[in-house]
Image (cartoon, grey):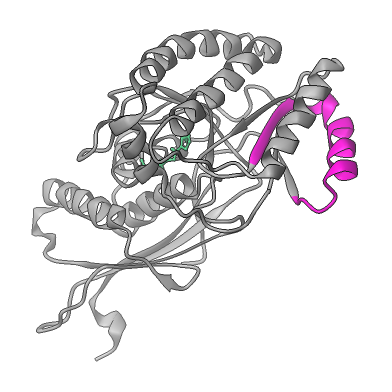
Amino acid sequence: MSKLDNLIGQATAIAHPNLAIIKYWGKENELKNIPASPSLGIALNELHTVTKVYLKHPSSNSEETDRVFIDEKLQSDRRFANFFANLRELVDKRNPKMGKFIITACSSSDFPSSAGLASSASGFAALALACTSALKFELPAKQLSALARTGSASAARSTFGGFVRLDSGAIYANQIYDENWWPELRIIVVEIEKEAKELSSRAAMERVKMNSPFYQAWISDSKKNIDKSLAALEAKNLSALGPLIRRSYLRMFSTMFSSYPPIIYWKPASLAVIILCEKLRSAGLNIWETMDAGPQVKILCLEKEVPLLIEHLKTQFSHLPFWICKVGGPPYLSNND
Ligand code: 2P0
């Protein structure tokens, strides 16, 4: 009997990572993976995660289990088991007669994974779309977002394109504007290091919540920051949005620096790029950097500032690769299945 005899369905989905300009950092509920801080993010059009899934009925007397491969390496992250448990709950509700099934997923990204470039956002968004498509479920956008969130909270944002908001306490994200809202906006992603980080975002968030004296202040401050950011985004006013972007990432890192043991994702080159941004701002450029749980630096600016910024990056950091991104669209299915 061929292995494909038990096949229920297969699908391949592609998703962009979603860069938070206002950060999700900390959980209201660890078990359900509910964020404690509101976030606002942007899909990055030049970066992609491609995930192919096969769903099949288990062969009799087999002990097959779900398996996820990233770049052909078998993963043991418990986030996948949590995501699959939630997927099965959904299947039980929509198609209770379906019976048991086993999932195999193979994923790869055209940017470094687990390095502060939101690969878990694009990864779980692509996984959610691929699994539901293999099951032939057409989920409403909010349900797809809620499913992706059970793997990784930032993935709730990555199931949409454009500008996306995930509120504190929310189970799904909402698109605020699509990818055509602000065509002049650019995001330069500077790759400082390719290596996967040693401490996961999840472990870092747990430590910060447990022992940073700044954690509660961070949560209440981020709730104040979000409304001002949305108003600046509505006005497409980068001079007003930029200081809020900077405040969000620096205050998020203050919770990490002040936890015990301290968490330091920054590298000397990260700080050097931040200092370059400070200098260029003092010289009148409207550019605003941000960072996530990793050493990479992302710089927001308008299209007209890109040539000068790139010239400075190439002169001062000729060894550092970078991408020039526009705002990306939603995840999509590949036609090759
Ligand atoms: C974000 N980050 O809003 C924030 C900013 C990193 C810094 O979401 O535990 O992989 O799987 O929900 O989504 C990274 O954390 O964490 C993240 P889990 P996730 O993009």
Asked which quadrant contains residue 98, the reply is bottom left
The answer to whether residue 164 shows anywhere in this view is no
Report the side of 47 relative to 58 (left or right).
right
Asked which quadrant contains residue 130, the reply is bottom left
The answer to whether residue 292 shows anywhere in this view is yes
At x 49% / y 48%, what residue is drawn? 332
Q: Residue 56 appears at what percent x and percent y?
A: 25, 71
Q: Judge whether residue 299 is colored magenta.
A: yes
At x 58% / y 11%, what residue is drawn? 234
- Residue stretch in magenta: 297-321
| On-image quarter of the N terminus | bottom left
At x 56% / y 18%, what residue is drawn? 247
Q: Residue 166 appears at what percent x and percent y?
A: 39, 26
Q: Residue 47 appears at what percent x and percent y?
A: 61, 49
In the image, is residue 190 above or below residue 68? above
Question: Toward the viewer: 288 or 72?
Answer: 288
Report the side of 329 relative to 220 (left or right).
right
